[in-house]
């Protein structure tokens, strides 16, 4: 895993359950459930799928008191930090704080008078939990819509600062902020402006990014652009797709910038007429079979010997396609030949053997350290 040249801007570190956000903590990937929260079993099952995909934090929508009680049941059945999504009713915030939420996503300006806000802040303080202020271009305050005419970076900043000022006045600093828009430029503008104003951690996202493919592209460009500038402490890729897919794309964005590794980083050729086997079919099969692996590893699979050896030397495991047998490189050295018509099975077996070896070595290290 090569080192990332990105210099992260300094933010204060807050806690979301067992996970830290901001400061020197790794950039975390989160998602949100889309099941009916009151259906406890379905929600727990979906959260577990997200955790298996690597999710660091999961947000659950809590629109009613009934949902708050369900949230309490869900909390008992999963280990991952949970953020409760609350919009207007401060009593729901107080209930989920009691039920074990790790973070409250709530905009203080939306929950009415100062007394209600004070109560929520007191509950967060009492339970040692954090908050997220989430500003959205689609739901800006009426007076800001009039003042700016349309959502702009400045409008999103002003909206965010209103909520931030309330918490600052109450001397509560354990919060992160998001300023999401569905437009790439608006997203970049708003986060750049906000990151100059505050030192709280920022939660990145493009809201309503869209269906799987276009939403992935939009998120990669906006989030990638901010991450390259060192802006962002946690992120969510919002797609009209399963939440576990959001998690995978989130990690793919971080992986592409060498910020975090989560499982296998595949290097594959785009496949051309020089290929000695069906690269696309092999890669799709491998990706599916090796999805459960969280150990960082570079695996290179190239269809011919033009670019193959160069890429293979850089990878932990590299395969250079030829027929009937392909050449395997291990840690940059030529190793052995494998049957080209058995590539998927052969590569899967090598990767799993290597993962086991690395895990055993890690256990030894831990024992030694003790």
Image: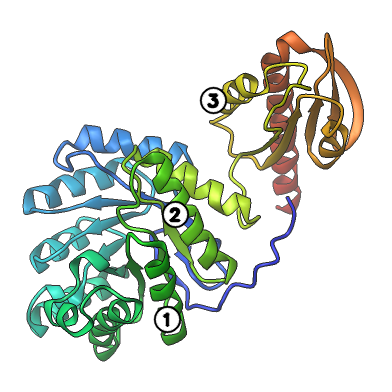
Q: Which residue appears farthest toward the right when viewing the image? A: 334
Residue denoted by label 1: 193
* CB atoms of marks 1 and 3 within 8 Å: no
Residue denoted by label 3: 288
> In the rendered structure, which disc, 1 or 3, sits on the residue that comes first in sequence?
1
Residue denoted by label 2: 219
Question: Between residues 98 and 343, which one lies in front from this camera angle?
Answer: 343
**How many neighbours does mark 3 have within 10 angstroms: few (below 14), some (14-19), or many (20 or more)?**
few
Q: Residue at x 70, y 40 (%)?
A: 297
Q: Is residue 175 placed above or below 66 in the rendered structure?
A: below
* CB atoms of marks 3 and 2 within 8 Å: no
Question: Residue 309 placed where, x, y %?
Answer: 87, 33
Question: Between residues 193 and 70, which one lies in front from this camera angle?
Answer: 193
**How many neighbours does mark 1 have within 10 angstroms: few (below 14), some (14-19), or many (20 or more)?**
some
Q: Which residue appears farthest toward the bottom when viewing the image? A: 169
Question: Residue 180 placed where, x, y %?
Answer: 33, 65
> In the rendered structure, which disc, 3 or 2, sits on the residue that comes first in sequence?
2
Quarter-of-image position of residue 291: top right
Task: Give how far apart the Cα atoms at labels 3 and 2 are.
Answer: 23 Å
Q: Report the number of discs.
A: 3
């Amino acid at each position: 895993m090569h080192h990332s040249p990105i210099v992260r801007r300094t933010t204060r570190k807050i806690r979301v359950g067992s996970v830290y956000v901001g400061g020197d903590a790794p950039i975390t990937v989160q998602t949100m459930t889309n099941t009916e929260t009151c259906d406890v079993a379905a929600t727990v099952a979906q959260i577990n799928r997200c955790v298996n995909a690597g999710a660091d934090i999961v947000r659950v929508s809590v629109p009613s008191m009934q949902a708050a009680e369900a949230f309490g049941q869900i909390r008992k059945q999963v280990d991952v930090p949970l953020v409760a999504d609350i919009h207007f009713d401060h009593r729901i915030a107080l209930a989920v704080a009691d039920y074990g939420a790790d973070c409250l996503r709530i905009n203080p300006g939306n929950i009415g008078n100062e007394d209600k806000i004070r109560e929520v802040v007191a509950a967060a303080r009492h339970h040692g939990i954090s908050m997220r202020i989430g500003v959205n271009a689609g739901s800006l305050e009426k007076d800001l819509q009039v003042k700016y005419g349309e959502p702009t970076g400045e409008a999103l900043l002003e909206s965010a600062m209103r909520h931030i000022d309330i918490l600052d006045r109450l001397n509560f600093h354990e919060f992160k902020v998001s300023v999401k828009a569905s437009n790439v430029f608006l997203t970049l503008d708003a986060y750049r402006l906000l990151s100059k104003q505050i030192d709280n951690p920022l939660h990145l996202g493009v809201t309503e990014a869209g269906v799987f493919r276009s939403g992935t592209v939009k998120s990669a460009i906006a989030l990638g652009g901010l991450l390259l500038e060192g802006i962002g402490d946690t992120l969510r890729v919002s797609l009209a797709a399963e939440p576990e897919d959001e998690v995978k794309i989130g990690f793919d964005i971080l992986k592409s910038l060498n910020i975090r590794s989560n499982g296998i980083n595949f290097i594959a050729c785009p496949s051309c007429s020089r290929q000695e086997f069906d690269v696309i079919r092999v890669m799709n099969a491998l990706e599916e079979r090796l999805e459960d692996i969280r150990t960082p590893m570079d695996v290179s699979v190239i269809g011919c010997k033009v670019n193959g050896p160069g890429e293979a030397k850089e990878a932990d495991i590299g395969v250079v396609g030829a027929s009937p047998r392909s050449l395997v490189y291990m840690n940059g050295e030529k190793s052995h030949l494998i049957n080209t018509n058995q590539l998927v099975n052969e590569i899967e077996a090598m990767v799993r053997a290597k993962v086991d070896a690395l895990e055993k070595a890690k256990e030894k290290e831990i024992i030694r350290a003790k």
